[in-house]
Amino acid sequence: ATNKLWGGRFAAGPAAIMERINASIGFDKILYRQDIAGSKAHCAMLVKQGIIPAADGAAIQAGLDRVLAEIEAGQFEFRVDREDIHMNVEARLAELIGPSAGRLHTARSRNDQVATDFRLWLRDAIDQLDIDLKALQAALIARAEEHSGTILPGMTHLQAAQPVTLGHHLLAYVEMLGRDRGRFVDARKRLNENPLGSAALAGTPYPIDRDLTSQLLGFDRPTANSLDAVSDRDFALEFLAGASILGMHLSRLAEEIVLWCSDRFRFIRLSDAFSTGSSIMPQKRNPDAAELVRAKVGRTLGNFTALMMVMKGLPLAYSKDMQDDKEPVFEAVETLSLSLAAMTGMIGDMQVQNAAMQQATLGGFLTATDLADYLVMQLGVPFREAHHITGRAVALAEARGVRLDELELSDFQTLHPEIRQDVHSVLTVEGSAGARQSFGGTAPDRVVAAVAQAKARFL
Ligand code: ARG
């Protein structure tokens, strides 16, 4: 049998393999709600403009409501021979209401229909991801507030650098996630234009009202160019680029959780709820969820690459290649919402091991910069010279096997005669962190203020 919706010029139906490669219903059925909303708006506009009779319009509206109810009740049969969500809905509508259904596709093409559905779907997905991102920020801010004064070794090159507060460290991720949210909000603004009414590629001779359908569907305005509207997918690419950057941020945080849970760090502990055991090594508590979050950014970047490759060589306007635009986006959204939920769970769950963090701050000469700063600020030594003198102090402490603050005053005075007893107070990790009062710095009272600001900016 030929296809009822487009088979007029065909004598025979498609080969089985043609039907299989052509069908998108397996994945685009999740667009059903947007597809039906788009059809209802289009139908209302056609009636208002006198393009189709009001009685047909009323039958179509009622029929579409029934189709929606059937799908939501799990009573709808999605058929591969009906190719995609658009034709599945329309064919079922025809079964329900008869020939009136045939008027719905007036002044419309699946090309503007699918572009509309996809934008509506992604708009909703972005709104949900924003909620998920905010929940993760809230979890991080709560832990930062608890640990505004907890000190751990800050690192560069994964080497001990300077003392930082845990609250400050966690708030760094709150900033990254805030920019991720901003990227999605920006993408949402640009995608919120209505392709409906562009028809196949050139527009339509019917006296349609694109402002009306825009308004009914919550779009800011109709798209300005019909060729662009049916063949642009940069709104999806922009989303996937932002998704990849977010995935990378989550992966870095996941990596820190893995490191901090390890036996060498023991900075945090995940409860049984977020740990897994080994089938052979009974002592194990593995941070699998963090490792999987770390892994998943590869898929999201792959999704971005996949769609970029689909689009890069296509002449205007629509080509069927573009049917492959949806799965990468659907997969990225699913991956991110799972990763965000898992990360929010882990951040809330982690037990901070204050003693281990404290212990770790004692090694690595974390306060060496503070000694150099003391020489500059108290004794007026130029910074480069102070750096050199401090390097000698570190070498001396290393040779003696002691911490910097364990050197005697007389040792310090061999390096610079004017160093006084008060040098010892700047060499503690508390003194070091507490001194970093510059805006955006790690001092505990700075963190307290930053927590309040983060709540106001993000929550
Ligand atoms: N299932 C198609 C897609 O996702 C709908 C658009 C089909 N348009 C066409 N001219 N064959 O892209």
Image (spheres, rainbow, N blue to C red):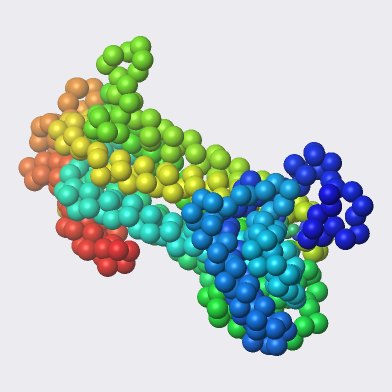
Ligand 1 in which quarter:
bottom right
The quadrant in which residue 391 appears is: top left
Q: Residue furthest left?
A: 421
Between 249 and 362, the residue placed more toward the observer is: 249
Between 439 and 399, the residue placed more toward the observer is: 439
Q: Residue at x 54, y 67 (%)?
A: 65
Between 82 and 118, the residue placed more toward the observer is: 82
Query: Left or right: 354 with respect to 174?
Result: left
Q: Is residue 105 above or below residue 396?
A: below
Q: Is residue 141 above or below residue 430?
A: below
Q: Residue at x 19, y 31 (%)?
A: 356
Q: Residue at x 81, y 54 (%)?
A: 3
Percent across and percent down for residue 420 are 9, 44
Q: Residue at x 19, y 22 (%)?
A: 400
Percent across and percent down for residue 106 are 75, 75
Quadrant for the C terminus in the image: bottom left
